[in-house]
Amino acid sequence: MKCINRKSLLWLTAVILLILGGYHLLIISEQISSENVWLGMIENREDLLKHEATSLILIGIALVTIILDYFHKVPNITRKIFLFFIVIFGLNTIVNLFAPTLLEQVGFSILAFIMMILMYCLSKKKEEK
């Protein structure tokens, strides 16, 4: 599978992750109802904050990994972290298919699948020039 230019790929992935981070911050600030996220499993504010904190930490790890990769630091570690995120986004794609809302079923399943593909492309070894 031929992937796009690596720097463009890193930027695209970072922008999507930042948008996702903003979405999670909107959930925390209650601008987006918690009934429409997390498969409707959120029972109280504490559960919501735990789930959202986990998401934001994972987004932060992904962004730090992208920065390290962008500056060509620790390529073996960044590659393994990208592989980890392939699994995370793959599982998220499957779980979202069973969500109670159409937004999660369609929108976030597609987004998670796209992120899985982006992480796959980033996990590939850099081509020698």
Image (cartoon, rainbow, N blue to C red):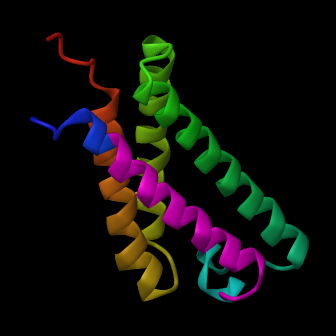
Q: Percent x, y for residue 68?
A: 51, 26
Q: Percent x, y for residue 120?
A: 30, 36
Please say whether residue 28 is one of the residues in the magenta stretch.
yes
Q: Nearer the viewer, residue 20 or 50?
A: 20
Please say whether residue 29 is one of the residues in the magenta stretch.
yes
Q: Nearer the viewer, residue 38 or 77?
A: 77
Q: Nearer the viewer, residue 85 or 2?
A: 2
Q: Percent x, y for residue 58?
A: 63, 46
Q: Main secondary structure of the magenta part?
A: helix
Task: Indicate left or right for 129 with 88 as reference.
Answer: left
Task: Indicate left or right for 34 with 69 as reference.
Answer: right
Residue at coordinates 28% horizontally, 46% vertically from top-left? 117
Is residue 41 shown to the viewer in this render?
no
Residue at coordinates 43% horizontally, 15% vertically from top-left? 75
Q: Nearer the viewer, residue 30 or 40?
A: 30
Task: Indicate left or right for 31 with 15 as reference.
Answer: right
128 in relation to 67, above or below: above
Split into 4 quadrants, where in the image is the C terminus?
A: top left
Q: Percent x, y for residue 21?
A: 60, 62
84 in relation to 77, above or below: below
Give the magenta range. Answer: 10-32
Task: Indicate left or right for 114 with 3 as reference.
Answer: right
Split into 4 quadrants, where in the image is the N terminus?
A: top left
Residue at coordinates 25% horizontally, 34% vertically from top-left? 6
Q: How many labels sit on residues?
A: 0
